[in-house]
Amino acid sequence: MRVSILYPFSCLLSAALVSGEASEAACDELASVLPNSTFYPEAPTYNASISSYPFLQLRLHPSCIVRPNSPHDVATALSILKDSNCTKFAVKGGGHNANAGFNNVEDGVTIDMQSLNHVEVALGDEVVRVGAGSLWQDVYDVAEKRNLTAMGGRIGVVGTAGFLTGGGISFFSPEHGWSCDAVVNFEVVLSSGKIVNANATSNPDLFAALKGGQFNFGIVTRFDLKAYPATTLWGGRTVYHPNATESLLTAYTNFKMGEFDPYAAGWVTVRYNHTAATFSPISIMWYTKPAQKPGALKQIMDVKPQLMDGKVEAPISEHTRNASRQVVADPERTIWTTTSFSISPRIMHRIHKLWADLVPEVSKQYAYAKPIAELTFQALPGPPRNGSSPNSFGFTADETPEKDLIFLQIIFTFTDAAATEGFEEALKDFLKLIEGVSKEEGVLHRYKYLNFAASFQDPFSSYGGDQKETLKKVARKYDPQGVFQLQVSKGFKLF
């Protein structure tokens, strides 16, 4: 019971009191203090917020939704919730994390940051200031008007907040590293209600912790991001004939084992559609220096036969807008998990064979849910170097994950909630088998990318024991009552 020792007023000790009545009372108080920002289930704004979640399993129903219009509104809401008999709450940025309960709550209170969606470019200092409710499409559209861009998401409908506090992988990550390392300042509301800035000189321990530690310390209300010159990208989706799968995996293996190219980004996926009983190999790759294309992507682009070539040269905003159409076209349920390994000549082929041999049989058991399974391989960014401010991932400056490592995403997308438990167990089985193969090859790596981790995983432990202890110290310092450990409904917690 270490948590209750650390936090003597622990909600764990009064769990019996935490009920629908308590959350309703909290909602009533929120409505009295923030009447224009608190919404009940009968309100159109409430229903719009619920329907904005991109995956169906996320569409839970809180007792009320608070949509703050300022950091001070966030502070007010936190103060009420902290004193509300341990009412559970969740915080929604873009709402793209696939783990149910991580960005919404059944009963309880959801703080929807959607109204904090301002994007502005600061004159003279080349900083893009982004509200925590902004989507990346908003950021790119505004910044490109000033011939600037940012280290953001590769799908426009992804939110800025969870993406950046979980790490963030950008088109420019091979060259510049994690997106969170392009944050120059976080504006944060602490559980005390105090609004602070976290940057290299002010609260630097909190600054590092927020780069990978997510919501364990406070609610970020604004990100100040380093701006980069706007550019066009060359690339996009290529769909290959199923017979090209082995060639594509070999090409990506050679790409990773060859000379590192900082302008080549993206991933390869093998997709299994159970209804059609087909496997589809796909590459989604970009080159950030179009005049020099295809660079190290040549072997991947040369794989044949191809069924569709969607590569174009276009502004970032066009690539992300196109990618968003794939996500929002037909909302379904999805669950995913992740692991990492060092590249070797055989490992991608071995993992794929294991998965491809088993996934049709797994999918057959839940055919009524019309499952689609995906196996995706992509590169990790490099750590901060040259004296840059640290992040929380535990890689040292002399490590080269951008060259050596691949992280894997294993996904099921489906239509029927009844299949959820079965697919979650299947993910656990796949993870155990794949990590077994990776260990046998001597290439298994500790790291688990938080933004793609399943609810049953512990990404903070994968950062390394010392790093997790550091995060715990920061949480105790900035949230001494443990509000974000005990009252936030779900998520990756430190205690």
Image (tube, rainbow, N blue to C red):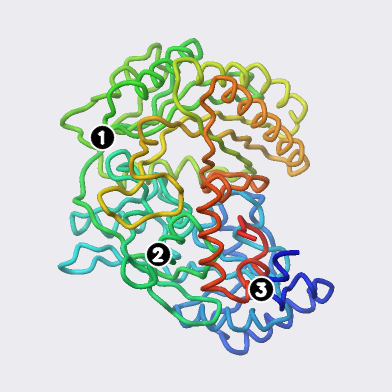
| Dot 2 amino acid type | Phe
Q: How many marks?
A: 3
Give residue 207's mark: 2
According to the picture, the residue beneath numbered tag 1 turns out to be 263
Q: Label 2 vs label 1: CA separation?
A: 28 Å
* Residue closer to the observer: 28 or 470: 470
Quarter of the rendering occupied by the C terminus: bottom right
Residue appearing at x 40%, y 64% in the figure: 207
**Looking at the picture, how far across and down is residue 465, in whole percent?**
56, 50
Instruction: State the residue position of label 3.
Output: 64
**Nearest to N terminus: mark 3 or mark 2:** 3
Dot 1 and dot 3 residues touching (CB under 8 Å): no
User: Mark 3, residues whose alpha carbon is within 10 Å: few (<14), some, or many (≥20)?
Assistant: many
Amino acid type of disc 1?
Answer: Tyr
**Quadrant location of the N terminus in the rendered image:** bottom right
Label 1 – label 3 distance at C-alpha: 46 Å
Q: Is residue 368 above or below residue 437?
A: below
Going from the N terminus, do you reach mark 2 or mark 1 first?
A: 2
